[in-house]
Amino acid sequence: MRRLPIFFLLDVSESMVGDNLRQLQVGLERLVKSLRTDPHALETVHLSVLAFAGKTRTLAPLTELAMFYPPRLPIGAGTCLGVALEHLMDELNRNLIKTTPQQKGDWRPVVYLMTDGKPTDDPSGAIERWRREFANRVTLVAIAIGKHASLTTLEQLTDNVLQLDASTDEEFRRFVDWVTQSVVAQSRSLSANAVSLAKLDEGILTKIGLDKSATVVDEDFVVLTGRCQNTKLPYLIKYERLSKMVNSLAFNLRLDNYHLAGVHALEQDYFEMSDNRVMTRTVNTDELVGAPGCPHCGNRIGFALCSCGQIMCIAGEGSAVCPSCSKTCNFNYDPNGEGFDVTRGRG
């Protein structure tokens, strides 16, 4: 039986932490469960999951649907789309069965690329390779999650660019159902050149045309990485930008601050998925509103800065050992202290 290869290339960068990553994990499980109820999909569909942040990893190699189990999605720093595309293309070259005089190869593969941000590397070389070697023989569906993804970059890869606006679990379930229906449609209309996508749910999905200008918004989030003093495990502190207009007779002024959106416990594999290049971008704490506790050990202060520049959690004033550099620091509360710069995550 000829295979229909379906690849999911998923953004697991820091900006995905929270609801986006949780919904993606649950969505994968729902997708597989639904696909297994369709006999056409069971006969032909093979699934693979690739995750990318600063680095890219194959979480699940190409596996027949009946034997496929959704992997746990990690998280990392950076959104290296160029690295992700190179990894995807290498996977396609390694795993696709080509048609020969002796056998018929795989049906035209389908790739679902999902991202919520902007590349933190230069993807131009990978995009050029994709357009030269794969664009005419692989169907790529690029899905921009939310309003901050770089649509201009995705439009260089494919005509099938969709913007997803799913703020609730129910809306994300509708999106997963759309992907399921599209995969089923692809399995039922197998043709070397056909592109079969289910009818768009216009309440959550918008087709981005080539003539539509894409807005690239910078500085929408601040993501900071901390480490638990007790467990040494990492966590992310996520802030979202909120703007406020100050109007007077003399001037109109827009003030931007970042408000705490959540703190999320991570596992050690966060560093394995992260871009390890030195990050020089900073943000001043005067721009940040709200401070969390530690999601691992419960220390009430999760935003203490060691002299090495790394964020850690502490129980309160006094001495504490930094989990990053192992030095002993002394912390004191100064209500009149000035803001200080901290290194930002790549997002």
Image: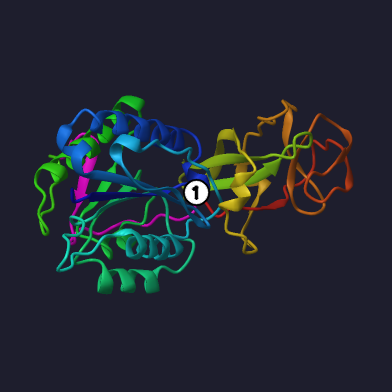
Q: Position of residue 260 (x, y in %)?
A: 57, 35
Vertical position of residue 216 compared to residue 169: above or below: below
Residue in the image at 18% along x and 48% along y: 1
Q: Secondary structure at mark 1?
A: loop
Direction from residue 300 to residue 133 in the image, left or right:
left
Vertical position of residue 95 compared to residue 255: above or below: below
Q: Residue furthest front?
A: 102
Residue in the image at 29% along x and 60% along y: 96
| Residue position marked by numbered label 1 in the rendering | 13
Direction from residue 173 to residue 326 in the image, left or right:
right
Could you say which quadrant of the image residue 300 lies in? top right
What is the span of residues highlighted in magenta in the rendered image? 200-220
Residue in the image at 31% along x and 56% along y: 151
Residue in the image at 32% along x and 73% along y: 128
Vertical position of residue 125 compared to residue 174: above or below: below
- Total marks in image: 1
Q: Position of residue 208 (x, y in %)?
A: 21, 53
Q: Position of residue 3 (x, y in %)?
A: 22, 50
Vertical position of residue 35 compared to residue 52: above or below: above
The answer to which of 293 and 32 lies nearer the viewer is 32
The answer to which of 259 and 222 lies nearer the viewer is 222
